[in-house]
Amino acid sequence: MTACAIETTAEDDDRDGEHPGRDGRPAACTAGLTITANGAYAARLAGVGDALYAERWTLDGPEPYAVPLPLDQPEEPGTQLLPLADGRVLVARRVDGRRNTFSLLYPTGPGTGELRLGAVEAPGSEHLVLLPPPPDGSCAYALCVGPETSTLWLVAGGAFGPEQVAEVPGRCSGGVWLDRTGRMLALDRRQAGGPVKAVAVDLERGGEVTPLLQIAEDSDDRLLLADPDSGLLLIRSDAPSPGHDRLGWGVLGSLLPVRFPECLRLDDAAVTPFAVQPGQVLMPETCAVALRIDAAGGSWVGTWQPAARRMGHLAAPAGWLAGAGLWTPEGVLRLPYATAGAPCGLMDVEAPPEPSPEPAAVAPAGTAAGPEGAAGEPRVCRPVPLQQAPLTDRKPAG
C-alpha cells in the first residue's frame, strides 16, 4: 500500500543497466507520496524550487486534505519522509555528507513542531534510506548500505533514539514487510558480486537471515510486494528468461511454482506493481493488483488478478503521483493526485471485473510452469516454503 521502498545501489544500477524503478526496485521515498500501511496518512515533499517543505495528507476522512509542515529552513531535495500512524511525519536529512539526522514533524497551532530523535553515521560510500512504513505504523526503520554489509536501524519508536537492530552481510535493497506484526522483513541482497536473492530478516531473533527466494541458482530474484493476508508475492526475476527480468507471482510458503504471466509483459513499457488488495485471506488468486505502466507516451495504471489471463488498463488522474495508491479490502483502488486546482486529491476507481479463471489456473505441485502456468517448460520456479523462511513462531497480532 505504500508508494515507496528503497533506492537501488549504484552497483545494482550498473549491472542491470536500467534506472531505479524500471525493474521494480522503486526509487527512494523522496519521490512521489509515501502512504502508511493502513492508508490513513501520507507524506511528500511539496513546494517549488528551493522552497521545499514536508506535507502531510489525511486520507481516511470524508475528503482528503493536506497540512503543510514548513520549518524556518527549507528542506533539501534529498530529504526523505515517512508518515506514522499517529499523524506525525518522520524526516530523514543528510548532513555533511555522512550524518543522517531524524526528526518528527507535527502541526502545532499555526506552526510546525519538531521532535529531534538523533542521528546515524553513514561514512564514506555508505548511504541510508528509509524502509516502507511497517504494518502498525508506530515506528520507522532505515537501511544503511555499506560496501559489504547492510545495517538496519530503528530510527523512530525506540526508547533512546536510533537503535541498530540488525546487521546483514551483503549489499541490500528493496524492503517488504511479510507479516502484520512487523517482525519479518524481506530484503533483496547481493553478496560478493553474486546474484540478487530475496532474504527474510527476523527482527525478533536479532536480525536472523534466512533465504526467501531461490528460484534458480544464478537468477536475480527480487521481492516487490507481499500481502500478509493472502500470502501473495509479486516477484521480479530473470529465471524464466536469463538476462531479462520478468514479473511473476507466487504464494508465500506454497510448493506451487512461481508463474510469470505473459499478460504482465509489455513491449516498450515497464510494469511495476505498487499495491495489492488486502483482506483476501487465503485467496491469493483473487487479490487485485495495481501496476504502474511507464512508456514513452506517459504513465498509466494497470489492474490484474492472478486468476485472470489479461491485464486491465486505466487512465490515471491528471497530476497522479505516479506509483502511489492503495486498494481497499472491498476492491476500490485509490489514486492520489495533485494539481494547481486540486493540491490534494484522491480518485477512487472500481476496477473492471476480471474474466473468470481458466480451469487449472494454479498448477499442481511438482509440475513445470511456463509464462501462463501451463505444463511443459523444463524449469520449475518456486518460492522457498514457509518453514524454510521462518514465519513460524510469530506472536499473535495485538
Image: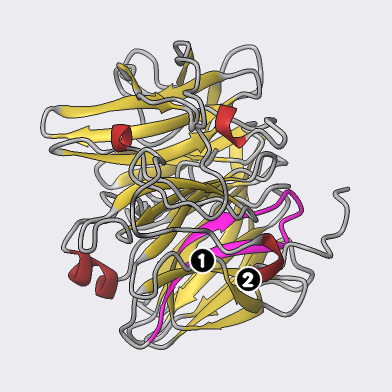
Any magenta on residue 92? Answer: no
Residue closer to the observer: 323 or 64: 323
Q: Position of residue 58 (x, y in %)?
A: 60, 27
Q: Position of residue 183 (x, y in %)?
A: 73, 62
In this figure, which residue is indicated by the disc labeled 2? 201
Magenta extent = 174-191
Image quadrant where residue 390 sits: bottom right
Q: What colour scheme was applied to this rendering of the protein?
A: secondary structure
Res. 110 visible in picture: no
Tell me if residue 109 comes above or below residue 193 in the rendering.
above
Q: Amino acid at mark 1?
A: Leu
In this figure, which residue is indicated by the disc labeled 1? 187
Chief secondary structure of the magenta span? strand
Mark 1 secondary-structure assignment: strand
Tell me if residue 162 comes above or below residue 157 in the rendering.
below
Residue closer to the observer: 324 or 235: 235
Q: Position of residue 336 (x, y in %)?
A: 44, 25
